[in-house]
Amino acid sequence: MLLDLTRIQGPRAHVERAYGLDQFDARGDDFRVVEPISLVFDVEKKADVFRLVGRVTTALELGCSRCLEPFRLPVNSAFDLRYLPQATNRGGEEDEVGEDALDVAFYEGEAIDLGQMLREQFYLVLPMKPLCRLDCRGICPVCGANRNTVECGCEAKWEDPRLAPLKGLRGHPDDREP
């Protein structure tokens, strides 16, 4: 999944790529790609700086954070990134990150790693708390049943057993003498 920069001869180029499910390695990620990836972008070249402006579309499979069931998240994400040579990376120095530094990445050699760029775009569209639907009822804390599919009938009242000894220290207000 590399973009060969030596093939970009003029100041602008248009690139369209399609990747199958087996071409993107998502092992170790919080998601799984479940539809082919469509990547369309324009490349602007100024000396050794490349600007990629485009869109990626696919679908990801995530686990719901309430019921743990897998669900699909459609991805239709626009991006605008600048790529600079790795030699210009002054990493390690303490420096304030400015607004213009957020869309900068680095390439090494004569290629840009589109797989890494796709991974970043996927993580940017992931919700902080993935839910299969807004009204997801989650898992019953007593029996572990998925409350979206089963009415378990468990009592939801829970008392912390560590606090049970404290109940005996102070009597019930109705039990006190006047």
Image (cartoon, helix red, strand yellow):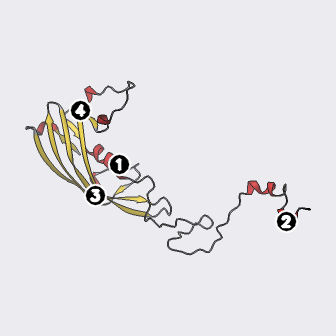
Residue at image point 26% right, 26% down: 88
Alpha-carbon neighbours of circle 2 within 10 Å: few (<14), some, or many (≥20)?
Answer: few
- Residue 127 visible in the current orientation: yes
How dense is the environment of label 1, judged by Cα within 10 Å: few (below 14), some, or many (20 and up)?
few
Q: Is residue 162 left or right of residue 117?
A: right
- Residue 14 position, x and y percent, is 12, 47
Question: Label 2 vs label 3: CA separation?
Answer: 63 Å
**Residue 131 spot, x, y in % from top left:** 44, 61
Spatial CA span between label 4 and label 1: 21 Å
Residue designated by label 3? 58
State yes or no: discs 1 and 3 in contact (Cβ < 8 Å): no
Specify the quadrant that holds the C terminus: bottom right
Q: Quadrant of residue 132?
A: bottom left
Q: Secondary structure at mark 3?
A: strand
Mark 4: secondary structure: strand
Q: Which residue is mark 2?
A: 174
Q: Earlier in the sequence, mark 1 or mark 3?
A: 3
Measured in 3D between alpha carbons, the distance from the residue under mark 2 to the one under mark 4, in whole angstroms, is 75 Å
Please state if 151 lies on the left or on the right of 20 as rendered. right
Amino acid type, mark 4: Leu
Which disc number belongs to residue 92?
none
